[in-house]
Amino acid sequence: MDRAGIVETNFRQRVAAADWPEGEPPRGPLTASDAMSVFRAQCLSRALDLESRRLQQVGEGYYTIGSSGHEGLAAVAHALRPTDPAFLHYRDAAFQIARSAQVAGQTIAWDMLLSFSCSSEDPISGGRHKVLGSKALSIPPQTSTIASHLPKAIGAAYSVASAARHDPEHREFPEDAIVACSFGDASANHSTAQGAFNTAQWTCFQSIPLPLLFVCEDNGIGISTKTPTGWIRQTFEHRPGLKYFFCDGLDIFDTYRVALEAAEYVRTRRRPAFLHVRTVRLYGHAGADVATTYLSKAEVEADEANDPLLHSARLLAQSGASTPSQTLDVYEQTRARVARVAGETVTRPRLSTADDVMASIVPPKRECAPTNGPSAEARAEMFRGELKAQKDPQPMSRIINWALADLMLEHPEIVMMGEDVGRKGGVYGVTQKLQTRFGQDRVIDTLLDEQSILGFGIGMAHNGFVPMPEIQFLAYLHNAEDQLRGEAATLPFFSNGQFTNPMVVRIAGLGYQKGFGGHFHNDNSVAVLRDIPGLILACPSNGADAARMLRECVRLAREEQRLVVFLEPIALYPMRDLLEDKDGGWMTEYPPQNERIAMGEIGQSGSGKKLAIVSYANGYYLSRRVQKRLEDEGVSTRVIDLRWLNPLPQEALVDAVRDCERVLIVDETRRTGGMSEALMAMLAEEVDVPLSRLAAEDSFIATGPAYGATLPSEESIYAAAKSALGGE
């Protein structure tokens, strides 16, 4: 008999014999009827775990990481309100089951078994993954196993108080909500989790409201690696700004009492708290995991003797809520019901095509209240002394600043956050005056932690805001990119479009900064941003385009709930001249507020057919200089500005080069993994035109005079163009 069978046999025999494990007597405010409700949730969670293992054995189920040993979380759910958003640990089926009893119309056993069998009728993921989650229960689905959902819990909690000051049109959370997020003791050590704890403390230290309840489920082990005894208590009991509570998750009366106290503290004080819940893990990590390969039999049996369901049966008997025979009847009836329902759910349809699987990568559009934009009077007040300058040519950095101000004035749900975006106005002055104009709660100076910055934005998007997080340099994204890949982009996919992360992430990046910063500030790698399904990557080359594209990016986030990254080429921020000193050829006027550049719309300079140069950002700027040289030599040329790097503007690009004799791709990202690979492949499939490319070397970027040595230059582009022309 496997360990699951042993645990079940022990439960039946010991309850029948009233052979109870040692424990404290029932105490606290949990009533007899509520205790029975919690126990029923625990029984259903256990029955689902056992059924998931049986389904896998017969080839009808696909997930066996269960909640056995963590059923005490049902009491935590009972202590919270069903409108309190909860970002759950993957072992928290009992929490969701208990919460479902608080909301009318739920069919939780049916729903979860549809998820186990990967049915397309699964109400949360549509058969894409076994995840906990429910729109009706305020539980966004999580696929995180390393606590990467904690940073967005910070943003969600911050948004509760922020919404009271700037009520967003699509607000989801009640004004008195608290946010709960749960995780395992092993995950508490992950850098993402540690960053979230630090951010919560940092926020609390400044008396900023943050109604957040961390729930750490401590079963003492992560897969096979033990958590040192006392480690969680030792490291969290005395953290400044993070109130510590402990409960025995084997005891539903104690868990409910302490969780109620912790929730009340968070709700009334609007400060974060840490609820440390003692649990055990039964059966090993997952169905294929045999715990006795890395734990002694005595250790395994000790945990099994502390089966939470045994403790609940003891407490129910001692409190008079249920007799042992009645308790066993509840358990057996639950097991039989789950087996009966499973027999039906395995017959339900499953996903079968790529289109079916991918249907929720792009979230659904949502209705937004129409707006005519800010009034002339409001703009005049905001841009006092600057309206005249908007009619004169300006560099990109200033035009982006004006575009951000106009957008924030028009849409009060836009919130910016990032290191130095407020008081300093950004490293390059792009966000100057915005904090003065809109306040510290809409232009937020964050701590130096990119995971927290992105998570902050993701969490605020859950509550109807349109966040605009700033990552100071592209190189700084890479330590936090999973917040976009594993959290923001996957949310609509694993929720069948029910939960979304509409946001615009601004990143200063790419190369060509003369003699400054090396690869930390001149990063030309965008591969990760093009590799995330559903993510839109926009990259302007001049100020007017930047303003128009930024407006489209905000529209895409606000109305179409898209995840957008707006990549701003640093070296072009201050660019003024194009062909010669002081010609002002790269400055533009601030475009009228109603002008946008739609996603997929490219730019083009010239209409020559001899050669089409396809590029973007700095490459487009340099190619425009080369274009003048070629035209002076009688070579008719056109230069294409991609503008949109993901998804590629395929239709527009193919139309733009189809009638040309040759195409040269100029790519400032690296030869391997850069933009040129995708462009070459796409054009080779679509047009019958000789193709060539010039890309950056597969190298990091140096500091000092060699800053551009590995990047395309005007001379190397000119040489590549002449080569493509065959020496003409």
Image (tube, rainbow, N blue to C red):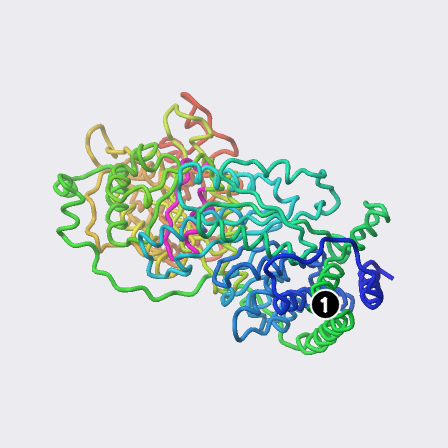
Q: Which of 390 and 164 is in front in this view?
A: 164
Q: In which quarter of the image is the C terminus?
A: top left
Q: Is residue 545 visible?
A: yes
Q: Which of 479 and 662 is in front in this view?
A: 479
Q: Is residue 275 left or right of residue 135?
A: right
Q: Is label 1 in a helix, a strand or a loop?
A: helix
Q: Nearer the viewer, residue 347 or 700?
A: 347
Residue farthest along the top direction in this orientation: 705
Label 1 sits on residue: 47
- 76 to 447, vertically: above or below: below
Q: Where is residue 18 in the image (x, y as percent from the top left)?
A: 82, 64
Q: In this view, does 619 lie to the left or right of 193?
A: left
Q: Quadrant of residue 719?
A: top left
Q: Total marks drawn? A: 1
Q: Which residue is drawn at 28% across and 47% down?
A: 545
Residues packed near mark 1 inside 10 Å, few (<14), some (14 to 19) or many (20 plus): many
- 646 to 319, vertically: above or below: above
Q: Residue at x 81, y 45 (%)?
A: 294
Question: Which range of residues does the magenta coloring cover?
Answer: 453-475
Q: Where is residue 114 in the image (x, y as percent from the top left)?
A: 63, 71
Q: Is residue 372 left or right of residue 249?
A: left
Q: Residue at x 57, y 38 (%)?
A: 191
Q: In this view, does 225 lie to the left or right of 439?
A: right
Q: Can residue 728 be seen in this view?
A: no
Q: In which quarter of the image is the N terminus?
A: bottom right
* Amino acid type at image mark 1: Ala
- 265 to 106, vertically: above or below: above
